[in-house]
Image (cartoon, rainbow, N blue to C red):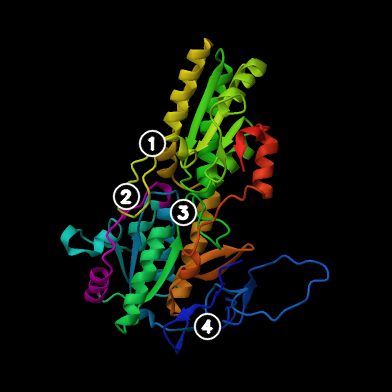
Amino acid sequence: MSQKLNFAVEYLGDRKVKSPLDPEGKRVNFVTDEEFIRFDIYANMGQEPRELDHSDLLEKAGPRENLYFHPGHVHAGIVTCGGLCPGLNDVIRSIVRNLWYIYGVKRITGIQYGYRGFLAKYDLPTMELTPEVVEDIHKMGGSILGSSRGGNDIPAIVDSIERMNLNILFPIGGDGTQSGALAIAEEIQRRGLKVSVVGVPKTIDNDLSFIQKSFGFETAVSKAVEAVYSAHVEASDAINGIGVVKVMGRESGFIAAHSALASNDVNFCLIPEVEFDLDGDNGLLGHLKKRLAARNHAVILVAEGCGQRHLVSANETDESGNKKLSDIGIYIRDRVNAYFKEEGIEVHVRYIDPSYMIRSAPADPNDSSYCSRLGANAVHAAMAGKTKVLISLWSNKFVHLPMKMAVSRRNYVNPKGSLWRDVLETTRQPVSMLNE
């Protein structure tokens, strides 16, 4: 691995405040800073043991016996950024309830519409958050704080943090959000301020590194599978029916891969990590023709970022710096129709894009539970004075992950790994059309 791993966690200073969680020491098993989870759990027989250090150890998350912040002095801020994702409200609710009921923090402010909410030019009001305000928000999709991309004027954001007298900031978002949060934390540090920045990673594509699973992913797969089922029914009940489903996955095809495995109805799964040929007998269209001749129907599942080399791109970016993608789903639909028209073969193509329905859906029970635990551990970390960290799940344990490590690279489906192998075995799609 070319990148030097360093999972050492930064903190604001000595912890001198006794935690209110368990004054009699009978209920809570406090976590110490000497408890870690190994990053690399694999081993080979005969492998030489080596001394462990911060390149292989992730600090265990959880409540600390001593705090950096006195709860009565804390003013906490919460902000949600980027695209919507199932579970945002669940995380907000968990953070508010744990701050309020567990630690006794009564000043909690919601920053509306992402980082723009910090900037005076947008003139956006803040939202006072209490347990009453967040009581039922986990039953709704989206974010009660709203969300947006951009607004990364770091000095102006930190100016607002100073004016608001925030002690803790919880940014909930993906790669761009956490890169911004790291820059905010570094500007805070340059100014000599004592503000904890603890992020909760949100990426529906599951593409943040060193994070076993991002919240909303299970809900996304569940909803994507419903779309695949619908496409399969439409395709199988028509003469030469073809269902084309597009799901999220700009650079990583985890949703498409897991949806293909979960449904068992997908015949062609296309992801950004694996290029595919479109034309010729060994291209997608040629193999699709063979599939129709054999079975009279087919389902194609595409991740939004796949096949971009087949499209004309304007090389534009959005306000978060993400490359704007051409619509591969519509392109595949139109090329399929044109190809079979030229071949003189009647087909009935049904195109389904459930992306915004998935993004705006409430979290399913598994994701909701996961969000609750992420929020709780974020509060524990912040009250203990941890900063520049995300709450991550690794080896089924909650850990503190330095933001710098999380945004250093993306997580991808490994074309030579077991997940993609299982997808190929499930779909039985011809490997001759793939350029692995």
Viewer-nearest of labels 1 and 2? Answer: 1
Identify which residue is drawn at 32% across, 49% down. Answer: 318
Which residue is denoted by mark 1 in the rendering? 312
Q: CA distance from mark 1 to mark 2?
A: 17 Å
Between discs 4 and 1, the one toward the N terminus? 4
Image mark for residue 203? 3
Q: Which residue is labeled 4 in the image?
A: 65
Q: Which residues are magenta?
A: 138-164
Q: Is residue 295 above or below residue 353?
A: above
Name the amino acid, label 2.
Asp
Mark 3 nearby-residue class (10 Å; few <14, some 14–19, many ≥20): many
Q: Which residue is mark 2?
A: 318
First in residue order: circle 4 vs circle 3 = 4
Mark 1 touches mark 2? (CB < 8 Å): no
Q: x, y (%) of residue 287?
A: 61, 25
Name the residue type under label 3: Thr
Give coordinates of residue 124: x percent, y percent: 20, 58
